[in-house]
Amino acid sequence: MRLIVTGIGDAFSAFHFGSSGLVEGSGSLVAIDCPGRVLAMYRAASERSGVPIDVQRIDDILLTHLHGDHSNGLETFGFARRYLTERPSRPRLHALPEVLDRIWEKLAPAMDGATRENGGISTLEDYFEPCPMSPGTEFQIAGMTVSCRRSLHSVPTAGLLIRDESVCLGWSGDSEFERDHVDWLSQADCIVHECGDHFKHTRWDELDTLPEQIKSKIRLIHLPDGAEVPEGPMRPLVEGEVVHIGS
């Protein structure tokens, strides 16, 4: 399993894309979150990583929550899949049920206009295939098994575990520090954990209280611009970095 890091910034970053990544499954890429300027983000990550990235290779989006730095690219992504290809297809949009219930409120003002195909009012289902992901259940995408857990954040948000036949990736999602959430993520071989300094986010000093065995698995994301991370096993990720899970 490989993770291509596409963004490491927080909501206020002037230098980075919103925290996000692509997991390489069997024959396709699975997106974790979809921040703004998504096409520029994929172009930059492709150039830096050497991995060809295009929205046509991404059939599944795992959306952790609706804050803009994680979801503002959905409009562009949906339009690109519908109109920038000769054979349009709908990507699957996986999110907590309460997130899917409200996402069209966010997208409709820009996307519910009449189209040449339907001649009427568009719906979310015209652009995406909504797929509820419920905590405590597993589902299969791109040859991998995904499960989720609600995190402690200001809006409904999910953390993720993504497994293939040999390794597991953990993704915290936005969350204040919660030991139960970290313990759930510790099943993974690599944990991508947010590290911010704002309300409802996890601080580095809180992560530093964890056992060394867990800290050795943690890679940091969602850092504020200019954040200085102390020396130690929990190192920040870099945009365009390719992480080989389990190696």
Image (cartoon, helix red, strand yellow):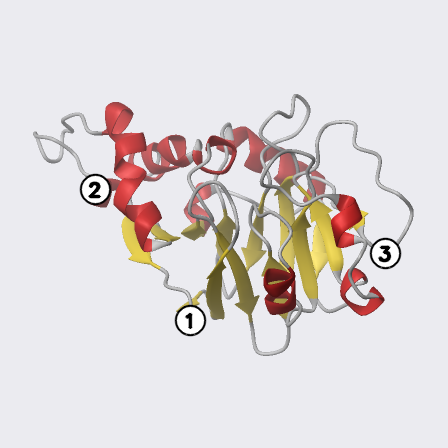
Identify the element where label 3 is drawn.
Answer: loop
Q: Nearer the viewer, mark 1 or mark 2?
A: 1
Q: Residue at x 8, y 30 (%)?
A: 120
Q: Position of residue 174 (x, y in %)?
A: 56, 45
Could you tell me how far apart the alpha carbons at marks 1 and 2 are, in whole angstroms?
Answer: 29 Å
Task: Report the disc number at residue 136.
Answer: 1
Q: Position of residue 149 (x, y in %)?
A: 48, 61
Tag 1: amino acid: Gly
Identify the element where label 2 is drawn.
Answer: helix
Tag 2: amino acid: Asp
- Residue at the spot of label 2: 126
At label 1, counting other C-alpha atoms closer than 10 Å, the crowd grade (few under 14, some 14-19, many 20 or more) is few
Q: Position of residue 113 (x, y in %)?
A: 17, 25
Task: Report the disc number at residue 123.
Answer: none
- Residue at the spot of label 3: 233
Could you tell me how far apart the alpha carbons at marks 3 and 2 are, in whole angstroms?
Answer: 45 Å
Circle nearer the N terminus (1, 2)? 2
Tell which residue pokes out farthest to the top in this image.
14
Asked if residue 38 can be seen in this view, the reply is yes
Q: Residue at x 60, y 47 (%)?
A: 176
> Position of 180 compared to 197: left or right?
left
Which image quadrant: the C terminus?
bottom right
Q: Position of residue 157 (x, y in %)?
A: 46, 49
- Mark 3–mark 2 CB contact (< 8 Å): no
